[in-house]
Image (tube, grey):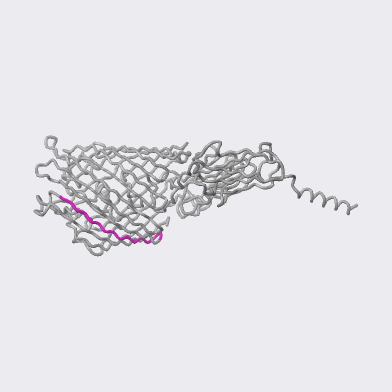
Amino acid sequence: MNTLRTLAVASALCTVAPGIAWSTDWELSADMRLVDSDGQPSLFDGGLGALRYDSEHEGVQVGRLRAALTQPLGDVWAVKLDASYFGQDDAHPVGLTEAYLEYRPYPVNGWRTRVRIGAFFPPVSLEDTASGWTSPYTLSNSALNSWIGEEVRTIGAEGQLEWLGTRLGHDFDLGVNGAIFGWNEPAGTVVATGGFSLNDFQTTLPNGYVGGHSSAVFPEQTIFHELDGHAGFYVGAQARYLDRVTLIALHYDNRANPAAEDIALNEAWHTQFNSAGVRVDTAAGWTAIIQWLSGTTSNGPPDDFYPWPFHARFALISRQWGRQTLSARYDVFGIESTDEDSFGAEEGHAWTVAYMFNQGPHWRFALEWLHVASEVADRATLLDEPTFAGENQTQLSVRYTIGSGL
Amino acid sequence: MPRISAGIFRLLLLCSAVPAVAGTISVQAMLANHEPFAGAVVTVSAAATHAPVAPVSAIVDQINLAFVPDIIVVPVGSTVEFPNSDSVSHQIYSFSPTKRFQLPLYHGKPYPPVHFDQAGVVTLGCNIHDRMVGYIVVTDATYFGRTDARGIWSATNVPRGTYHVSLWHPLLRDTGASLDRDVSVTGDESKNITVQLAQALRPAPLQATARSRDQY
């Protein structure tokens, strides 16, 4: 009898099995650029320019080659891998921008939990909501989120708890999250050494770096190291009014020992910041985003700290109609320096205007103009050049995507 | 004798085809700005005991990351199938007390229909695509439907009796008695009811985009 029951259950499962979708979802994309730039040598070549492409990297460039997959493991677990090659410099390797195990149990009585274990972006950006942590509004990220992409990654575990009020007849959803992480002690190097930049680069794991080979100004710096055995943490909160207004806030502290370094002379930077943002979406296709971030990063022996307070904020307005999106953004960013030579000090602002045309699920065309003006003390002390630079970059992007879900 | 029997049979048939004295209940729903309220769910329940409405088999599809239709009304005891016509997988759930269920990750039509045996509103969601939301109104009402573009819905051939008329929509901010009416049908007449909302509806959900990470 038991055998019969087992057979009956097994046959029932077999009839159900064909449509149960535990198959791999995947996506491949190639984003090529045609670039015009009068920028100074960029962070990726060890310079102090604030653009992704400098005047030595014009013409046809690789924007990003990307392969991503999601492999469900049963019903509520999934592995997500996102690998990219950003071109930029032949020395920048193919690597993983994100790689994590996700646990998504079903909501219970309006409460939902999410757990991520692995390497992923902390919940800072209100811009980068499209696949591959990219922006649906512009090609280049704001200075704020460019910095996150360059050197901040959670390598650890994150938990999120949400109350789905809108599913219970209320107007709000609320959520809190927190994470503990390691292997990100060098975070702070880029902002203190190279300053802010506006780009869509994402430093890849495990060996991706920012900076340039044999650069005296900004030598290459790998980002993902554990140097002191201290776990960092962040805690954050989100609130949504229907699907129209989104508020997020985050406090981040990598709790690094600023005196720590390894035998390869990778240095720890104690970096902490607070960030907050609001996004408003309307039925007429308008989106407005304001994001703010303020923090400090410190490095050096205990009796000779160099703290660098830094801040970045932006306002973006975007209008989508049909397959077209037109966006404009204004960025402000700055780094103070307590060093007597003002090492690392910077003030800047930028204007970005972008037009995007999504022809369908496969083709996307984009045109972006970006102007950044910055006053950087190190241009005088390290390069014997004027501290002020105005840089302009125009990009035409053609991206082709294929995937199981398109 | 056979001829007489046939005559009586025809007479009986005629009698049964002519309804007892019956009326019409017509409901017009108006938004706060006095525009018609299309798509509102109207239920009309008889005060007296009545035979239950026969259950139906309904379908709520998933197309372009949306439930289609986004709202259905079915009698208690009905079944609903949830095929997934998208190329991406969905993971459908309800935590509504009326009916809690989960359909693990799937596409196509791998699962048998879900049985709804209790009256109430069931809110549908997808555990992968957070913006997807749909509603199944499971009702034990005698008559039910949704208002048309003019904001009107009517029940015809309503027998004499007292009825409770109720209006519902997921975007309603109005609550309580203003959405309910009691009406008596006493003869061959048309009872017209107007429900005028005092408050504007909640904004309708924005259309989900396939490229969205559904985060924040």
Relative to A398, residue B195 above or below: above
Instruction: Determine if residue B132 is in view.
Output: yes
Q: Quadrant of the C terminus of chain B?
A: top left
Q: Is residue A367 magenta?
A: yes
Work out whether residue A167 or residue B99 is closer to the camera in this orientation and state it. Answer: A167
Q: Position of residue B109 (x, y in %)?
A: 53, 51
Considering the whole magenta stretch, tell me its main secondary structure.
Answer: strand
Is residue B65 left or right of A160 when viewed as pictured? Answer: right
Is residue A11 left or right of A50 when viewed as pictured? Answer: right
Instruction: Determine if residue A11 is in view.
Output: no
The part of the chain drawn in magenta is A360-375
Residue at (45, 48) in percent of width and height: B205
Is residue B172 left or right of A52 when viewed as pictured? Answer: right
Is residue B153 left or right of A45 when viewed as pictured? Answer: right
User: Within the image, what quadrant is residue A122 found in?
Assistant: top left
Q: Position of residue B200 (x, y in %)?
A: 48, 43
Work out whether residue A341 or residue A400 is closer to the camera in this orientation and state it. Answer: A341
Residue at (33, 41) in percent of width and height: A248
**Which residue reaches farthest front?**
B34
Residue at (30, 56) in percent of width and height: A139
Q: Position of residue A262 (x, y in %)?
A: 17, 42
